[in-house]
Amino acid sequence: MSPTPVELFLLDVDAHWPLTAPRIPLKVFGSTALMLQTTYVRGTKDSDILGVDPILGTMAEDLLRLAGKDSTLHRKHQIYLDVVSAGVPFFPHPTHWLPATDLNARLRSFEVQLLDITDVVVSKLKRFSDSDRNDIKAMIDRELIDHALLVERFLSAADVFSMGSQAVHVIHCAKNLNWVEREYLGDPETEYELPPWADA
């Protein structure tokens, strides 16, 4: 099977990066993680990489210089890398990462890990743009989302977010979950209230 546009981009990044041992883990989430795990294809502007060790400091700067916004590889593939702070995404806990086995067999210096499909859907409840809703619907239409598991993973993310300054976002995410339950799944809406100790 021919490489997808996202795979071609990551293979090109790898080809331009110095041979590295041990391999550098790249944790990919967002729509690109969905496209690397399914037959889903849509126009995208970025391949998000979770900014955790060792994607920090000069390594992150070098990666963005090579494949970030307005780079040569961005112009060539119409995709760019974006190193994202670990504290920003609305992730379930513990987060489920899966190896991109077939792609990794073709890479020299990187080891790609993909956010599990249900976890990607949960993460999209925070921003919930038109493209996020389209991504969520595409996964539901492919029967890749189980309602009970989705709620379980949402609650694990809500628990973590409720402990800090991000708690204000949790009720917004809960309302977006209810919208997905009502409009896309046709299932009863999950009732959620912030715990009394939340920093809201």
Image (cartoon, helix red, strand yellow):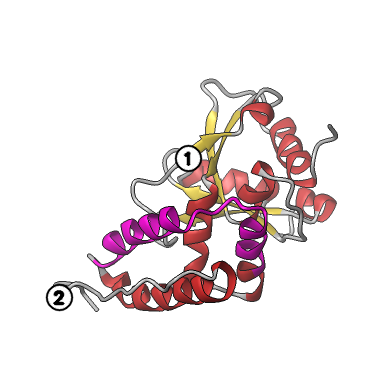
Q: How many marks?
A: 2
Give residue 16's position: percent from left, percent from top. Answer: 73, 34
Instruction: Please give the name of the residue rendered at 55% of the width and 73% of the height, measured from the top-left corner.
Output: 128
**Gap in angstroms between the C-alphas marked 1 and 2:** 31 Å
Of labels 1 and 2, earlier in sequence is 1
In depth, the one of 33 and 179 nearer the eye is 179
Q: Given the current orientation, which residue lies at the most extreme front position?
A: 187
Position of residue 109 in the picture relative to residue 155 (left or right): right
Q: Amino acid at mark 1?
A: Trp
Residue 139 is tagged as none
Instruction: Please give the name of the residue rendered at 61% of the width and 68% of the height, measured from the top-left corner.
Output: 132
Residue 196 is tagged as 2
Above or below residue 172? Residue 135 is above
Instruction: Please give the name of the residue rendered at 67% of the width and 22% of the height, measured from the top-left corner.
Output: 105
Residue 97 is tagged as 1
How packed mark 1 is, by other alpha carbons closer than 10 Å (few <14, some 14-19, many 20 or more), is some
| Callout 2: SS | loop
- Give the residues drawn in magenta, as a range: 134-162
